[in-house]
Amino acid sequence: MKHSFIDQYSDRDSFLHKLDPRTKFITTLAFILAVALTPPNRWQAFAVYFFLIAALILLSKVPVLYVLKRSLVIMPFVLLIAVFIPFFKEGEVAGSYNIWLWQVSVTYNGLQVLWNILAKAWLSILSLILLTSTTKIASLLDGLERLRMPRVMVMILSFMYRYIFVLIDEVMRMKQARDSRNFGGGRLWQLRTIGNMTGTLFIRSYERGERVYAAMVARGFDGHSRTLNHLSFRPVDAYFSLGFGLVIILTGVFNLLSG
Amino acid sequence: MEEVVRIENLSFCYPDGQPALTNVNLTIHRGETVALIGPNGAGKSTLLLHLNGILRSNGLVEVFGRPIDDDNLKEVRRKIGLVFQNPDDQLFSPTVFDDVAFGLINLGYSEAEVRQSVASTLDWVGMTGHEQRSPHHLSFGEKKRIAIATVLSMNPEILVIDEPSSNLDPRSKWALIGLLKRLPMTKIVASHDLELVQALCQRAIILDQGRVIAEGVTEHILADIPLLRAHGLAPTEVA
């Protein structure tokens, strides 16, 4: 079965695609750090970050609509956590409401924090989407390994990428098998079926793990994983990091000076 | 003829105590292609896993004149290439290249050697140009070829294949048989696909309920319809 992949547009051709994954990973990390550390009232700084990431997205030739759609996916999670903040933050009251027995009030302070969290989360997710849609997962993993990320973690990520779709296929087949034999039954019965399916999936995954391990051992795996280096820094990586770093650092310095 | 594999009195039980192999004896000679045929659950796969020491139990498994032990395990696994039945188990890397290179890198080959060997193996199985694809994107027939390539790249002296034709359409199956036929090394093929056995193997061993039932020239074994029928292998139940 075909699935949409996280690195769906990673085979396009732009200067971002050609950058070394290490360059992209580190600049993305730096960008997120800078965004997270910017004080809430520095909207100029946020504007700079936004234009920076927007320009890169345009340059990357990844469809803008796709990036926007993807970026909305995390919003429910952020909202779920952040939506209560305006009600709890102390400060000047922006409005108060009576909900049944309670009186709740929203503060300006709280609203600013909420806006800030949303903006920071959105900018960060935009940069991550840009990273994963301009870099093949395989080379991103390669890059992480060269950056001395623990080998076990890289392997876990790589197995996850390899088998998540195999598992999704398995779940879909199980669902089809269930639906083609499902003749109603109460809610409780349905829950029971889902429970059984989950259990089966766990056991199958466990057994698949054993078989995969046997296949690895059969090809000389002895617990130490070794890989070839496919990566190389080029001058363009240096220019990009330099330019990107400069923008972030200048924004930070400007923040400090004007604060 | 030189013996390359000798198995004597091999018995194996699953962890739940169910016997999988009982007193198996067999010998494989250099250069021959031997079929291991038997119905589902006969113990074929279990037997194959003993050939390179993934499973070990009492009984003798001798490879190139030496019993498998901890010291020669690595050597044995280099010389005996095992292709698993399900290519989704065999192919675990993010790209085709990484998968074909996996065994070579574990053997300590240099980068140039690895690249050279991956290229020539992919050429051999007709999959040049697919290096950077993810195994998940391949068709089943392509996965099967890459699965064989992952083992072939290590240049094994004995190729052991579990159910090479399972889930393949006839065209892919015959393409695979053609490919296997061109390989010069000793081959052990577990299958219940009698067409494939007939096309590929000179000798056949019937395994059922963990025991060796019969052994002989493929033509004779496949002509013995009552024998095949007794072990659920006959092409049709009527006639």
Image (tube, rainbow, N blue to C red):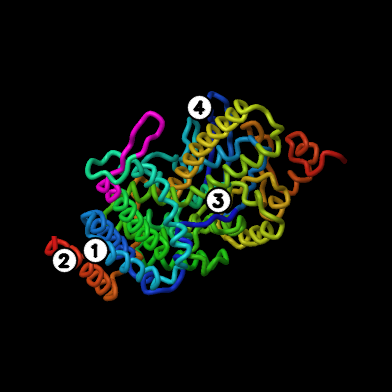
Which amino acid type is shown beneath numbered disc 3?
Pro
Q: Nearer the viewer, mark 4 or mark 2?
A: 2
Residue picked out by circle 3? B87
Helix or strand or loop: what does disc 2 sit on?
helix
> For this view, does A223 lie left or right of residue B157?
left
Q: Callout 3: residue from which chain?
A: B
Image depth: mark 3 or mark 4 in front: 3
Residue A181 tag number: none
- Labels 1 and 3 positioned on one and the same chain: no
Q: Are marks 1 and 2 in contact (CB under 8 Å)?
A: yes
In this view, the mark in front (3 or 2): 2
- Residue matched to label 1: A45
Q: Gap in Å between the C-alphas at discs 1 and 2?
A: 9 Å
SS under mark 1:
helix
Residue B15's disc is 4
Q: Quadrant of the C terminus of chain A?
A: bottom left
Residue at point 26%, 44% (across, down):
A93
Percent across and percent down for residue A42 are: 22, 59
How crowded pointer 4 is (Cα within 10 Å; few <14, some 14-19, many 20+) is rated as few
Where does residue A31 sit, x and y in percent of width and height?
A: 27, 61
Residue type, numbered disc 2: Phe
The residue segment tinted magenta is: A97-113
Question: In the image, is B64 to the left or to the right of A32?
Answer: right
- For residue A247, which quarter of the picture? bottom left
Locate residue A79, reporting x and y percent.
38, 46
Please give the chain letter of the residue carrying mark 2. Answer: A
